Amino acid sequence: MNIRINIPKNVRLIIDIMLKNGYEAYLVGGCVRDCILGKEPKDWDITTNAKPLEIVALFDKVILTGLKHGTVTIILDKESYEITTYRSDGEYEDNRHPKEVKFVSSLKEDLARRDFTINSMAYNEINGLVDYFNGVEDLCRKVIKTVGDPKKRFNEDALRMLRAIRFSAQLDFDIDRLTLNSIKELKDNIKNISKERIREEFNKILLNNPRKIETLRECGILEYIVPGISKIYNFNQNSSYHLQDLYNHTIIATEMVEPKIYLKLSMLFHEFGRTCIRKTDENGISHYCSYSKESSRMASEILKYLKYDNDILNKVIILVQYHDYIMENKVSIKKLLSKIGIDLFKDLIKIQRADILAQDSKYSRKHLINLAEAESILNEIIDNDECFTLKNLKINGGDLLSLGFNKGKEIGEVLNYLLDIVIENPKWNEKQELIKLAMKR
């Protein structure tokens, strides 16, 4: 196949300098794959037979990024470009890192150590595409396949098992049968990978194609990533709103929400609590009182286990806790706004819409109309600058102190009392009226 890649100016300059000084140099890995697929690469990685210190001698500004592994970073026009010496990896002792690396002179030997065929291609403008392991063929077949024996690749680095599923999600490719079977066989090795690395691959799967969660489940990895998720498998909700079991409802709902990681995670966890809080009446209909709080608690535990940051943790906890909040009128909307703020309320509308779209379609039209009305009320509240927080109340703690109220708890109680009145009756949000109400309390 005659493939030509349009190489950016600075990348071409680096390769040209390497070639003019008697070295080999190629684009390698993901950038080659993405260019063949017609995608814009995020990074332009280069590989060469030059040793790191030989590279350093050729360029003005070089950062010794990973000298031990043969990687340096060249800075041109304030942009960074990684260039790595051809290498082979020694024995892997921890299912993640090679004990040692050895620099080699052969491009083929360097490409042979890489994870998947679609990531083991190299390119420069003199020799064109170098594809020893049929990466282009696998791109055309839309298949994720390891370079060489999949068991060997996954025993070297267990993270590659998650990367295979992540690439499958990103590219909408299938995983080669032998590769998939090897993941199933070696699934327990995932325990040797840090939670942070697992989390990052899991995020990319959720953001690109939540359906690929099923592959994680099929391979026996999902329960390790999300402890307790097996409880929702085949969980019959016994509800007229849900045709799907809880697991399939969750996957559909996660698909339906926009690709922001805290929204995807909120949909993933939004109904976990149903597995712990279920009461079935004499008609065989199940009820789940306060399950959202339990779902929120479970989400918190799992997110901490996966070491998510506090910003994501707090957003997911709130969105899961209120995902089934009934927005029946302006007062109920203002009361929730006072607790979670405008931004999270807008996110909550997205969460509720995704949840509705994952339910029985015969009920969804009515619920979507109700949700649209709630969104319209929200916009009206914002446009009219209606008060729903203490910050917008036209009286403050200092005013109450001057009226003789006690500093501390009493001030807070009075302010919240006045806010409740104003939420129900916006016309009372005038300082003199609020003073009268406070004095009558």
Image (tube, rainbow, N blue to C red):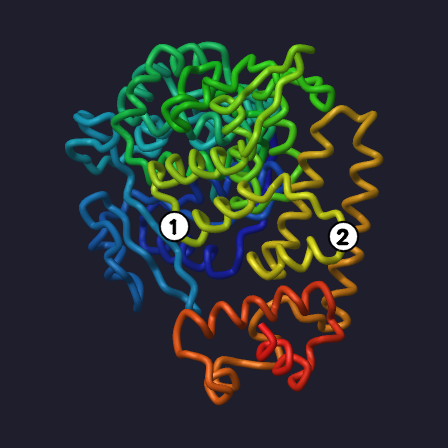
For label 2, the residue is 329
Q: Position of residue 41 (x, y in %)?
A: 53, 47
Secondary-structure class at tag 2: loop
Q: Nearer the viewer, residue 370 or 283?
A: 283
**Residue 84 place in picture, x, y as percent:** 31, 46
Residue placed most toward the observer, 187 or 326: 326
> Does residue 232 appear to the left or right of 300 in the view shown?
right
The residue at which mark 1 appears reads as 309
Instruction: Check the image and report above or below for 253 versus 123.
Output: above
Q: Quadrant of residue 435?
A: bottom right
Give the residue drawn at x 23%, y 57%: 64
Q: Is residue 149 above or below residue 119?
A: above
Work out whether mark 1 precedes mark 2 in sequence or the reverse, and give the earlier one: 1
Residue 266 percent across, percent down from the top left: 54, 40
Residue 13: % across, % down? 44, 59
Q: Is residue 11 left or right of residue 40?
A: left
